[in-house]
Amino acid sequence: MTRGGFTLLEATVTTVVLSVVAVAVLPVINGATEAFSAASMTERMVDETSYALDRVLRLLREAPSGEDAGSIGVSTLDDEQVIFSDGTGCRLSGGSLELRSAGGAWDELCADVDEFELRALDASGADTSGAPGLVQRFEVRLARGEFELRSVVFCRARYAQ
């Protein structure tokens, strides 16, 4: 005569063994899930911050020409904003990095920005905040969370003659 099922003892032992295995494996699975979540959030933050910096650099690179040959047209310039003569610009406003297209409204480019620093420099590397027409290049620093991105961009209008 053959038996076709588990005895109560076999079923209890199997349940206990599987429970011990589950208790051992659960922290590993939980840790992997948390690591994936953190990596995804970090990747998203890096992508958003890189995109925002790229858009700002493009705006600065394409600064409009000024009244004098080899100069750029700047209306407003300080550590956290630049507005060009054609109305385009970028600024830090209440933790949000904003960008404005020609004739448009200010649009949020990146939220939760901790610091945005904009330095205007002439050919010798001296600060030109007081004379914006002499700007040759901009140094940009964007800090968000634990990330900080820096870049330097030269204005095309300075060389188009």
Image: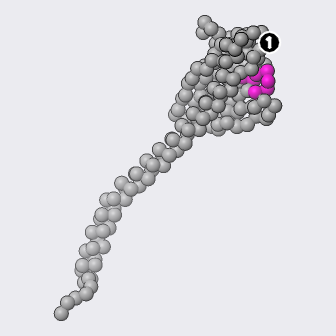
Mark 1 Cα shell of 10 Å, populated few (<14), some (14-19), many (≥20)? few
Decide which of 136, 18 is in the foreground and name it.
Answer: 136
Give coordinates of residue 60: x percent, y percent: 67, 23
- Residue on which disc 1 sits: 67
Residue 9 visible? The answer is: yes
In which quadrant will I find the C terminus?
Answer: top right
Helix, strand or loop at mark 1: loop
Residue 140 colored in magenta in the image: no
Residue 147, position as x, y percentages in the image: 53, 32
Give the residue at the far bottom of this rendering: 1
Q: Magenta residues? A: 82-88
Question: Going by the picture, which residue comes out furthest to the right?
Answer: 103
Q: Residue 149 is drawn in which quadrant?
A: top right
Task: Locate residue 100, reporting x and y percent.
Answer: 75, 31
Q: Is residue 34 left or right of residue 50?
A: left
**Amino acid beneath label 1:** Glu
Q: Residue at x 20, y 90 (%)?
A: 2
Does any portion of residue 129 appear in the rendered image? no
Residue at x 77% of width, y 9% of height: 68
Q: Residue placed at 79% from the left, 34% from the top?
A: 104
Q: Please tell me which residue lies in front, 37 or 56.
A: 56
Residue 87 lies within the magenta run: yes
* Extreme residue in the front direction: 161
Quarter of the image for residue 93 reads: top right
On the rendered structure, is 39 left or right of 59? left
